[in-house]
Image: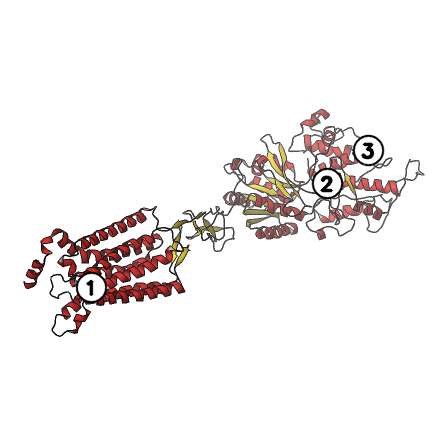
Amino acid sequence: MPAKNQYVLSLVYTVKEINKNSNILANITLGFHIYHRYYDERINYQSILSLTALQNMPIPNYNCEIQRNLAAVAFTLFGSEKHDIVKLSSFYQMVPNERHQYNGIVQLLQHFSWKWVGIFAPDDDKGEGFIQILTRMLTQNGICTAFTERITGRDFSFHVPNFKERSRNLLLYLKKSQAKVLVIYAEIQAMTTLTLLLKTAEISEITIGKVWIMTAHDDLELETLRWSFIRQTFQGSLSFAVHSHEVPGFQNFLQLLSVHWPNERDIFRVFWKEAFNCLLPDFKDVKISCPREEEQKLLPGTHFEMGMAGRRYSIYNAVYAIAHALHIMYTTTLRPRPATDGHKWKALNFSPWKLHYILRGISFNNSAGEEVTFDKSGETKSGFDITNWVTFPNKSFSRVKVGWMDCQTSPGGEFAINEEIITWHSTFCQVPPSSLCNENCPAGYSRKTQEGKPFCCYDCVLCPEGRISDQKDMDNCFPCPEDQYANKHRDQCLPKVSNFLSYDGNLGISLAVLACSLALITAVVLGIFVEHRSTPIVKANNRDLTYMLLISLILCFLSSLLYIGHPGIVICPLRQIAFGIIFSVAVSCVLAKTINVVVAFMAIKPGSRMRMWIGRRLTNLVVLSGSIFQIVICTIWLCTAPPFPDVDMQSLAEEIVVECNKGSVAMFYLVLGYTALMAMVSFLVAFFARKLPDTFNEAKFITFSMLVFCSVWISFVPTYLSCKGRYMVAVEIFSILASSAGLLGCIFAPKCYIIVLRPHLNSQGQLIRRSKS
């Protein structure tokens, strides 16, 4: 049965219920006139004019016959804007403004993360306005329009050239489109045309698995769902409907409709013809006997919805609002006067503006228990229901309420939906579909818009090193905090661990063992020299200077242990100061030994004044002067910019380097450079003295030891600068150990060999014999 006939039944039921209610308009009977709303505006205007007179051809501004006592006019229409509807202060909207459901559509799309949608609208002004407004709102909320399809309604014809080809192309395009969600302005002509287009293009092997979202136009002819292909296509659709509530007694009223009601006989004729394909007895072309009244309960759902939903509910509230306003006006100001023509009562006479004044502040609870009232703009304080279309193979049909939208609450709190009770199209396997131009970019990737395509179409680009994205579809990757780093998937920041050379690691333990071992070996060598201090080989090489050099080497080896462990306020300055001073003493001792050898040979010449410098006087001067200058440099360093514990969060991606900041890099390289300068001087002096004739000449050994020493520290600089974290410290320790070991091995190994393994060579006679030879 057409939806408009259901509006009539809703009106009839409401008027009957009011007339039976003794608490509203007692002794007054409401009546009504019904006019069909056509799709031709001229006919509609004529119907409106006919409300003022009984004649067939009404003349504006003239009352040619008995004037009807018209109290109010009820329309079943939407208004998308205030100016779309007659600008009268006495106009009241029983349905919410159409613009509200556009917000609902956007919120529905956002709820399911649908970003790629198609739009269907009639090819007229309303459809164009719908497309423009909705497209703008979608863009503002990050949703793209895959396509827009304008449907011609009034001029639709099966005889339009290439109509079948157009229908088939539309079907194939819908099947191919990535847009799984289609929004349609569900005006009746557009819906009828669309269903006929789809039916004409029906291809048995193609199933259109889409989610159709329809605006609140519930005058859709349910008869269009009689085709199996159309029922399958619209299965699982979501539609907006004017908010409604079950009205007690309405279904019982429908089930007890009687053809024997004399006053409503003409109204129900169409009901029986459409619902049961039969005619009442007074029709001449009766084909099928009409069912008995008890059989009306078996009416198919595709022909008739038994509930008072959508605008039928609005008609119910509208009639009650008028009745309550009339009741207030009757009980406060008016009284019906007796008729003079034999009737019991004359019709009420009143000014319409008085009724408008009362309607403006009307407020009551209907029989469904809901409050009916108007806001200051004359719009009912209501909202929209979100319904789910469920069709069945037996041609039955149901609209299940799955959500709602309240137009009166603040933004963000007016929308709710229960997706667990939604029945989706069979192709989606009861899982909400994804409607995107392309798949979501997972966490760890960022979106890059494809050139020439809408912003919803993009490529997924892996986040660069050091940056992450922890959500899907992020436009940009962002860096982790300094104390965190990006994991390999670049979707999460992990805390960095501390990086320093410790005794817990293999590297730290190995270097510590090596340093202690070399210090112990040096101590053994010192013990050997002390034990054999009276032998010629020990005396010949300045015994006191040898002791001083060995002790400084022991301290050099042990000073490397300061570099292992967590840097501290005391440890950091002590590292650099100990390194600079101890090494300057060691190198000064080597330089003193070298100079002592040269002076000794120069003093042999007759009349040489160098004899006065032979002995401790010269060696002590060299050692003290070399060491004091380094001490001065270190003191200035400590007073100006001393080393301090620091953290470096940038050098290593996954670790925080805990280090000793040099304080002043220039002072660090000045200390290192001064030590290197003394080593170079020692090397040059020893190199030129290497061929001096002497059994125990140390010059050749010092030359080789200084060559090792300088090689180690020359290679240290680039190696140190290329390392990070604990490995920088390890390079520094290794350089200290290697250079010190070079001095120990090159200078003292030959002597220990003679003292321990060849003691017969360590005698005065052997020295004289070797000297003569």
Look at 18% across and 55% down and name the residue there.
529
Label 1–label 3 contact, CB within 8 A: no
Query: From the viewer's perspective, is residue 211 above or below residue 125?
Result: above
**Dot 3: few (<14), some (14–19), or many (≥20) neighbours within 10 Å?**
few
Residue that protrudes farthest toward the bottom in the picture: 607
Which scheme is used to colour this image of the protein? secondary structure
214 horizontally vs 176: left or right: right
Distance from Cα at disc 1 to Cα at disc 3: 129 Å
Dot 1 or dot 3: first in sequence order is: 3
Residue 626: which quarter of the image? bottom left
Q: Position of residue 462 (x, y in %)?
A: 43, 50
Dot 2 or dot 3: first in sequence order is: 3
Q: Amino acid at mark 2?
A: Ser
Give residue 593's mark.
1
Residue that protrudes farthest toward the right in the picture: 340
Q: Amino acid at mark 1?
A: Lys
Q: Locate the C terminus and report the quarter of the image it occupies.
A: bottom left
Distance from Cα at disc 2 to Cα at disc 3: 20 Å
**Closer-to-camera residue (408/704):** 704
15 horizontally vs 442: left or right: right
Residue under label 2, please give it.
314
**Closer-to-camera residue (497/140):** 497
Q: Amino acid at mark 3?
A: Asn
Residue under label 3, please give it.
21
203 horizontally vs 411: left or right: left
SS under mark 3: loop
**Dot 1: few (<14), some (14–19), or many (≥20) neighbours within 10 Å?**
many
- Can the viewer see residue 319 in this picture? no
